[in-house]
């Protein structure tokens, strides 16, 4: 089931409206360019947990059950929810190790979730900037997607990150990316308006 996150984009929308008035690009190109920029910045701002951090986190003792590590407790909770027999002894340790192993594989996945949006929207934004190479051991197209804006009165582009954990970690990165892109647009708009004013007064 998809998880939706609400982000305050009022600052971004205000900057975008002002930017559209001075940009020489079409509306669809503008929207696609900003969407690609946001996806790029989201990759930069999305943290990737280190293997050591994951290992120490999941092997730490649980506050709820001090005799169990977080990884072992997770196995117990999952099996209870699925009405399965809870493993014991070596079997529980093996299942906990598998939890840790799978968590380590997910390193970089949230970052990669933005990558497919970059790849899908980049041609429509006429950008030469290459997307980053991510060591995620996965297919980015399965982790997220992008839908480019088309010409019309209300062009809309979509960037989506479908990785588990993206609503919590990725939302913060997306918010920061939008704030930075709003600042970029305001800076560009101010410079363009200043140039136009000099031409008018010349």
Image (cartoon, rainbow, N blue to C red):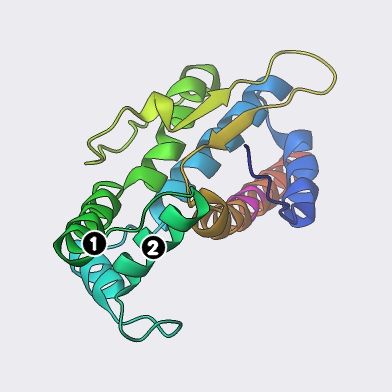
Which residue is under mark 1?
Answer: 92
Predominant SS along the magenta part? helix
Tell whether position 184 is magenta: yes
Q: Nearer the viewer, residue 47 or 20?
A: 47
**Sequence-wise, which precedes: disc 2 or disc 1?**
2
Residue 99 x %, y %? 28, 55
Residue 186 x %, y %? 68, 53
Image quadrant holding the C terminus, namely top right
- Residue furthest to the front: 85
Could you tell me which secondary element the residue under label 2 belongs to? helix
Image quadrant holding the N terminus, namely top right
What is the CA distance from the residue labelled 2 to the residue labelled 1? Answer: 8 Å
- Residue 26 visible in the current orientation: no
- Residue furthest to the left: 90
Image quarter of residue 18: top right
Would you say 155 lies left or right of 1 here? Answer: right
- Residue 76 visible in the current orientation: yes
Tell whether position 7 is magenta: no
Would you say 107 lies left or right of 17 here? Answer: left
Residue 53 x %, y %? 25, 70
Q: Residue at x 31, y 66 (%)?
A: 71
Q: Residue at x 34, y 33 (%)?
A: 131
Q: Which residues are magenta?
A: 180-185
Q: Residue at x 66, y 27 (%)?
A: 157
Q: Nearer the viewer, residue 10 or 136?
A: 136
- Residue furthest to the top: 151
**Label 1 near label 2: C-beta < 8 Å?**
yes
Mark 1 neighbour density, 10 Å: few (under 14) some (14–19) many (20 or more): some
Label placed on residue 121: none
Image quarter of residue 172: bottom right
Which residue is under mark 2?
Answer: 76
Could you tell me which secondary element the residue under label 1 belongs to? helix
């Amino acid at each position: 089931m998809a998880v939706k996150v609400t982000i305050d984009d009022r600052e971004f929308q205000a900057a975008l409206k002002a930017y559209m008035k001075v940009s020489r690009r079409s509306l669809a190109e503008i929207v696609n360019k900003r969407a690609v920029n946001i996806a790029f910045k989201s990759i930069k701002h999305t943290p990737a947990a280190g293997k050591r951090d994951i290992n120490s986190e999941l092997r730490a003792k649980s506050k709820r059950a001090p005799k169990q590590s977080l990884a072992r407790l997770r196995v117990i909770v999952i099996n209870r929810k699925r009405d399965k027999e809870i493993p014991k002894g070596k079997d529980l340790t093996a299942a906990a190790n598998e939890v840790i192993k799978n968590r380590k594989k997910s390193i970089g996945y949230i970052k990669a979730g933005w990558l497919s949006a970059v790849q899908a929207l980049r041609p429509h934004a006429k950008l030469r900037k290459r997307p980053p190479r991510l060591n995620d051991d996965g297919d980015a197209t399965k982790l997220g997607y992008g839908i480019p804006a088309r010409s019309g009165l209300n062009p809309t582009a979509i960037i989506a990150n479908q990785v588990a954990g993206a609503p919590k970690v990725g939302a913060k990165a997306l918010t920061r990316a939008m704030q930075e892109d709003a600042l970029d647009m305001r800076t560009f708009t101010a410079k363009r308006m200043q140039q136009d004013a000099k031409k008018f007064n010349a």
